[in-house]
Image (cartoon, helix red, strand yellow):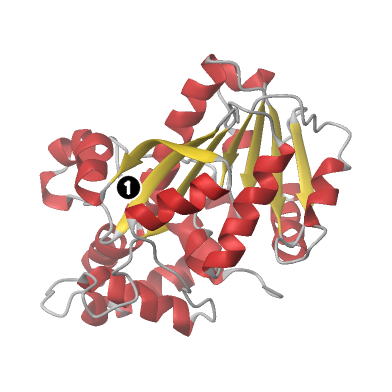
Amino acid sequence: MEKKSLTALVSAFSRAYHAEHNQVKIFDDPIAIQLLTDQEYEQIAFNMSQAVSFFRPSFVGSQEQALREVVDYQLSPSPLGRAAFAEQSLAVAASLGAEQYLIFAAGYDTFAYRQPEWAEKLRIFEIDHPVTAADKERRVSALPLAKPANLHCIAADFLEADWTSRLAACPAFDPERISFSSLLGISYYLPKHAFKQLLSSIARLVPSGSSFVFDYPDELTLTPEAGERAQKQVMMAMRAGEPMQAGYSYAELEQLLEEANLLIYQHLTPSEITRELFQAYNERQPDHKITAFDNVNYCLAVKSSR
């Protein structure tokens, strides 16, 4: 974590490419492309188009077609689907009284800069590793974007025991306000005990009724029984120096959440994700269909009152 996250950069590229190349979108992030330099965008695009033989061995077509194939098949499903799920869930939580939005491992998330009117009442906190947080700030400061008045950026390493003190010390943070916590793309890269500890630490900071949204790999992800895309994603993460470390069965996740004083409110499997989040796009783009990623589920949990 002592360097810019390659995974976060590729995720930003995926959101940018989808926004630039589709009228009907699974998730619309028009700002993502502004956070990447032209050189970064072109380099990632070139590398991915050249990797088509790895991801789609039977593919035949041009370099641009190869890029589209890799993006739609391998890169986009998770960043687009989980972001859509999280922000739809956030909108519901805000309508029910949530007043704080905590984005953990924020990476190059752009919600604060494209927030709708209903979000203006929220206190938004972007929480990330100091290296990534500094890089995000550098990129944003170079753009003609004013920092939203309700945005607060906190540099913290979740692997350090006292990271919660950095959030608690922020004057804008109120432990009495109902909060919505986003932990997208985190569960893969932490050992199980560390992910449980992270959830428990956050749960102790927020009141009952607060929500948690995250994606997670199932129990087959790190085994030969995983889907082809999942196996290749594991290989990609390893090569990027960000190895995946855990997978969870539903029962195991349910137990972990219960021990953190959280209860599952909504849970989506890959087939449900495709049906609920991707259907409108797929109907309009039959030649470029996107399906939810193999072995990845989405979860919305709520802190119980006990």
Tell me if residue 177 can be seen.
yes
- Say which of 202 and 83 sits in front: 202
Residue at image point 64% right, 58% down:
197
How many numbered marks, from 0 up? 1
**Structural crowding at the residue carrying mark 1, measured as other residues with C-alpha within 10 Å and reported as few (<14), some (14–19) or many (≥20):** few
* Relative to 260, 168 lies left or right: right
Q: Give the percent coordinates (x, y) of residue 81.
A: 36, 45
What residue is at 37 percent from the left and 81 percent from the top?
235
Q: Position of residue 286 (x, y in %)?
A: 11, 45
User: Quadrant of the rendered structure where residue 295 is?
Assistant: bottom left
Whether residue 36 can be seen here: no
**Circle 1 SS class:** helix
User: Which sits in the foreground, 290 or 162?
Assistant: 162
Residue drawn at the location 73% of the way across and 39% of the way down: 205
Q: In which quarter of the image is residue 64?
A: bottom left
**Amino acid at dot 1:** His
Residue 276: give x, y in percent of width and height: 24, 35
Judge by depth and name the residue closer to the eye, 127 or 224: 224
**For this view, does 277 lie left or right of residue 159?**
left
**x 54%, y 63%: residue:** 9
Q: In the rendered view, does 43 fall on the left or right side of 147?
A: left
Q: Residue beneath label 1, please?
A: 21
Q: Quadrant of residue 4?
A: bottom right
> Which image quarter is the N terminus in?
bottom right
**Which quadrant of the rendered structure holds the C terminus?**
top right
Residue 29, relative to residue 228: is it above or below?
Answer: above
Q: Position of residue 293 (x, y in %)?
A: 28, 58
